[in-house]
Image (tube, rainbow, N blue to C red):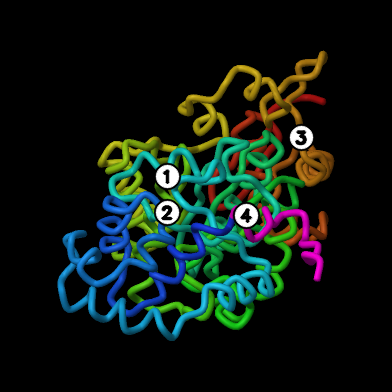
Amino acid sequence: GHSRILPENFHSLFSMHDSIFLHCLGKIPGVGAEKLRKIAAHFDIFETAWKAPLDELLQTEIPEKLAEIIVHERAHISPEHECETLERHHIRLVSKADSDYPELLAEIPNPPQLLYLRGNIHPNHRPAITIVGTRKPTEYGVGIAQEFASELAKSGIVVISGMALGIDKAAHRGALQGGGETIAVLGNGLDDASIAPRTHLDLAHTISLHGALLSDYPPGTGASEGTFPARNRIMAGMSLGTVVIEASEKSGTLITANLALDFNREVFAVPGSIYSENSRGPHALIKKGAVLTASLADILDALPLSREHERRETLFEHTESAQPHLSADEEHLLKILGSDTMHIDALVKRSTLETSNALAALAFLEMKGLVKNIGNMHYIRTYRV
């Protein structure tokens, strides 16, 4: 019969053709990224590797035992069936040879040979920033993550995170609220059944519509302790910089930040209270040379963005009246704040905003020099309207 019409974001089975063999090889137990690299170095195309006889496989520096396992296992794996499975889950393959492969990721030592992508964006068309942090944030952390992500998204920057509970979720949400694009890098397969945490399945669907889910694990792979280091490498590798918002000293978040430093990328750390356990991670990073980040400008100024990019409307673009650009929440709070000081609780009550949103808006108003926290969460306006 005629070939079936595929959804637009599939480059038809033919261009998926060679990477499907790479995917099949990767499904064989014992064939990880390291072994795939040795195979890739020897064969021009993966179809040849998939069909190679034992003596040919032995010339690739992989152990004899593994070569035998490959020959045995591949008899039970059907590339056609694998193609259909990926199609059913709307997952496409991006190999290192493809133009879709994230350019910055290709620059790190030993990048993944194959990525799985579920979504609607080309990972190279815009600069990207990673935002990560604790799974147990304070309202301050959640507010800042959402606001930073929203403003970055409005500036045309893709927000990357790991879709974990806490700061990651707030970063994805903020980017979506800002009407921008976000990429979730996961330590599991991209089929619905493998998505973790389970409570974020709806979020995963939303992200796949306004960005992408990305992984180097095939469908059917569950998340485990062992799958997260690879995810952290991808997040740090494919972005210009990593922003850390709230993390304890032992947090896995710091692994991502340290990888970013290893890859020669910028690391931004948002300071917090010296009494908070969640501030220890960012403060340790600042001591190591991370950029102390108190505003979006601190991020944008440190990045090698094109001028055209910086001219996009960002937080700090001034209108003719030299008034800073304000969000609706910020304008609302400014109206409530008269010349008297007000406590955060009173402000929240009067404004009917969520506490986290009010705190974030106040933090940004403070950065713009429009309000001041004069101690113990009492705020005052510092300019006349």
Q: Most prominent secondary structure in the magenta stretch?
A: loop
Tell me the distance, in whole angstroms, between the alpha carbons under discs 2 and 4: 25 Å
Q: Is residue 333 visible?
A: yes
**Dot 2: element:** helix
Residue 148, horizontal then vertical, whole percent: 61, 44
- The residue labelled by disc 3 is 326
Tell me the distance, in whole angstroms, between the alpha carbons under discs 4 and 3: 16 Å
Q: Quadrant of the N terminus?
A: bottom right
- The residue labelled by disc 2 is 234
Q: Indicate whether 234 appears above or below 324.
A: below
Disc nearer the start of the sequence (1/3): 1
Q: Nearer the viewer, residue 176 or 72?
A: 72
**Dot 4: element:** helix
Residue 265, horizontal then vertical, whole percent: 37, 37
**Dot 3: element:** loop
Question: Which amino acid lies under the numbered mark 4 shown in the image of this protein?
Answer: Gly
Residue 143 is labelled as 4
Tell me the distance, in whole angstroms, between the alpha carbons under discs 4 and 1: 29 Å
Question: Which amino acid lies under the numbered mark 2 shown in the image of this protein?
Answer: Ile
Q: Indicate whether 144 appears above or below 90.
A: above
Disc nearer the start of the sequence (4/1): 1
User: Crowding near pointer 3: few (<14 within 10 Å), some, many (20+)?
Assistant: some
Tell me the distance, in whole angstroms, between the alpha carbons under discs 3 and 2: 34 Å
Identify the residue shown where x is 68% and y is 31%: 315
Which residue range is magenta in the image? 1-15
